[in-house]
Amino acid sequence: MGDWCRSDVPPVKALSVLGSTGSIGTQTLEIVAEFPQRFSVVALTAGRNLELLVQQIRQFNPEVVALADPALLPELRERISSLSLQRSPDLVAGSEGLCQAAAWPTADLVVTGIVGCAGLLPTLAAIEAGKDLALANKETLIAAGPVVLPALERSGSRLLPADSEHSAIFQCLQGTPWPDTARLSTGIPTPGLRRIQLTASGGAFRDWEAADLVNATVADATSHPNWSMGRKITVDSASLMNKGLEVIEAHYLYGVDYDHIEIVIHPQSIIHSMVELSDSSVLAQLGWPDMKLPILYCLSWPERLETPWRRLDLTEIGQLTFRAPDPAKYPCMDLAYAAGRAGGTMPAVLNAANEQAVALFLQERIHFLDIPKLIEAACERHRTDWRSEPSLDDVLAVDRWARTAVAEASTLPLAA
């Protein structure tokens, strides 16, 4: 009997991929190419990499394509006019176009791979449309957790973590009771969960002494020992801000208070995070440092798909080691905890200030050690305007303010 009449053949899951030319987006599309019988692409969004985007359009033939920059739309239209496509995709642009692609009617799951706060509005558009999300955009919860969680509650959308650490936690918790297994990421404390341990590689400077960071260059900070990532996230790893942001994200995802979310340096990046349950059991998820596995789990959840990928061999690794992070070397870590505990609009300021400071560092306009100084100064200035229960407009306003504050402060001498 052919597959066409078998009742157990799973339906093809249609994806909207936000940020298709970035690291998360390209790896998502690699998975789609490996599992064409399970996944299809109905929407793509991209920034400025038109050459790669055209290749993706040729290969996956989406129903809609959105560009962040409307000025590039005529060039994209011209480039795809010569392609032999089964159908010509709708072409849209700007913030409205990104939101349209995120809420595309035929999409079953939206992969949010747009970096930074630019991904917030499309993500909210997907939630308001009732779409499930594979969340790779940390800023959605970090900057706007007080806005996003109620939106999830209203729409019934499910937020599936696609980054390796939160995917590890999510996988470890599959055997524990949820308040409601149909509703994820509502901020409701997970029954039986006592503590989360987020593992960190330690980044580019894990083997440096804190005193030696005065010599750190952009080339040093963007050379990650374990992972292949974009420049911004690689700098965040070097400062450990990436882990500080994940602490805030874990608080919103799993409802755990900040005293029970810890960061552990794990140089091998084999254990992607651990959870301690109320009975003292500790569960961990292990795997090679490869983002494709957590992305695949988001796409296939609640199923697991057979893959031909390299299998983990612990005898090949030999040993797994752990140590506590040095606050003197990673001041961004304590800044993130402080912003998370303050709550309200403070995490949005922290996130935006960090994005702006890292951008200035990558442009070689400030030193690596200036990044935490600029972030701390912005957070301190914001205390007088802090709001405990922000609206979306509040979040967007403080995001703009923090970027401007950091840009202005970067032209002044920084305190030692």
Image (spheres, rainbow, N blue to C red):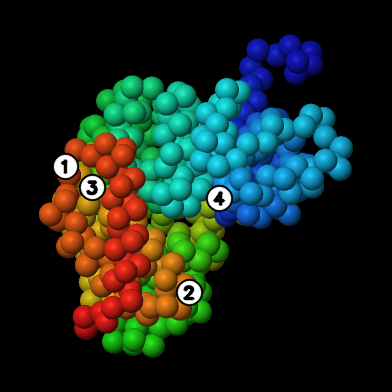
Counting residues from the start of the chain, the first of labels 4 and 1 encountered is 4
Q: Secondary structure at mark 2?
A: loop
Counting residues from the start of the chain, the first of labels 3 and 1 encountered is 3
Q: Residues within 10 Å of mark 2 (few under 14, many from 20)?
A: few
Q: Amino acid at mark 2?
A: Gln
Counting residues from the start of the chain, the first of labels 3 and 2 encountered is 3
Contact (Cβ within 8 Å) of mark 4 with mark 3: no
Q: Amino acid at mark 4?
A: Ile
323, 319: nearer the viewer: 323
Say which residue appears at 17% left-offset and 62% top-offset: 380
Q: Considering the image in quadrants, where does the N terminus appear?
A: top right
Say which residue appears at 64% left-offset and 21% top-offset: 11
Q: How many labels were placed on the picture?
A: 4
Q: Amino acid at mark 1?
A: Ser
Q: Which residue is mark 2?
A: 363
Q: Secondary structure at mark 4?
A: helix
Horizontal and vertical percent for residue 308?
Answer: 67, 46
Q: Which residue is mark 3?
A: 345
Horizontal and vertical percent for residue 218?
Answer: 47, 78
The quadrant in which residue 404 appears is bottom left
Counting residues from the start of the chain, the first of labels 1 and 2 encountered is 2
Q: Secondary structure at mark 1?
A: loop
Q: Is residue 377 above or below residue 272?
A: below
Q: Which residue is mark 1?
A: 388
Give me the disc on residue 24.
4
Gap between marks 3 and 2, in whole Å?
28 Å
Contact (Cβ within 8 Å) of mark 3 with mark 1: no
Q: Nearer the viewer, mark 4 or mark 2?
A: 2
Q: Is residue 121 above or below residue 357?
A: above
